[in-house]
Image: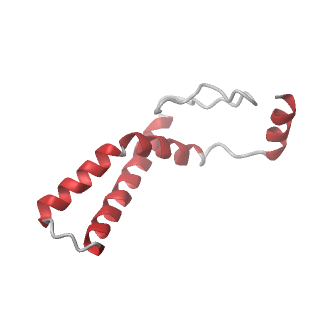
């Protein structure tokens, strides 16, 4: 789930950039993780769960560990969208060639 193809099978767009490109996705992953942790914290408060500080911390850690593969994949997609732009013409050509 966490692997990235080298190129697009339809249009041949090169996905993999230099290795340092993925350092940026680590920063995005940190932001997504923090946002998710805050969301879990607010959700426990809204549900009125009286878990205490250690319990809430445990729930946040468990959620982050369970969702780690998805956080990594989403972070790579978010970071890549800063550099790769969708081009409708290329998509149409790829669709016609398929």
Residue in the picture at 42% in, 46% down: 71
Please name the residue shown 36% across and 50% down the image.
Answer: 30
Is 71 on the left-hand or right-hand side of 16? left
83 horizontally vs 1: left or right? right
**Residue 95, position as x, y percentages in the image:** 82, 35
| Residue shown at the point (47%, 33%) measured from the top left | 1
Q: Position of residue 9 (x, y in %)?
A: 70, 27
Quick check: 23 above or below 7? Answer: below
Please identify the quadrant where the C terminus is shown. Answer: top right
Count every numbered label the image shows and give the total. Answer: 0
Residue toward you, 71 or 13: 71
Q: Nearer the viewer, residue 87 or 93?
A: 93
Please give left or right for residue 16 compared with residue 40 in the image: right
What colour-coding does the image apply?
A: secondary structure
Relative to residue 41, is residue 4 depicted above or below?
above
Picture quadrant where residue 56 is located: bottom left
Question: In the picture provided, is 30 more to the left or to the right than 24?
Answer: left
Q: Where does the image place residue 28, in percent across and percent down from the top left?
A: 44, 49
Q: Position of residue 11 (x, y in %)?
A: 76, 30
């Amino acid at each position: 789930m966490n692997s990235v193809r080298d190129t697009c099978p339809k249009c041949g767009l090169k996905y993999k950039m230099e290795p340092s490109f993925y350092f940026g996705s680590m920063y995005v992953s940190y932001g997504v993780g923090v946002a998710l942790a805050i969301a879990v914290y607010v959700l426990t408060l809204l549900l009125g769960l009286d878990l205490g500080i250690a319990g809430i911390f445990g729930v946040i850690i468990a959620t982050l560990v369970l969702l780690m593969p998805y956080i990594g994949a989403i972070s790579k997609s978010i970071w890549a969208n800063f550099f790769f732009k969708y081009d409708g013409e290329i998509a149409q050509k790829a669709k016609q060639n398929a």
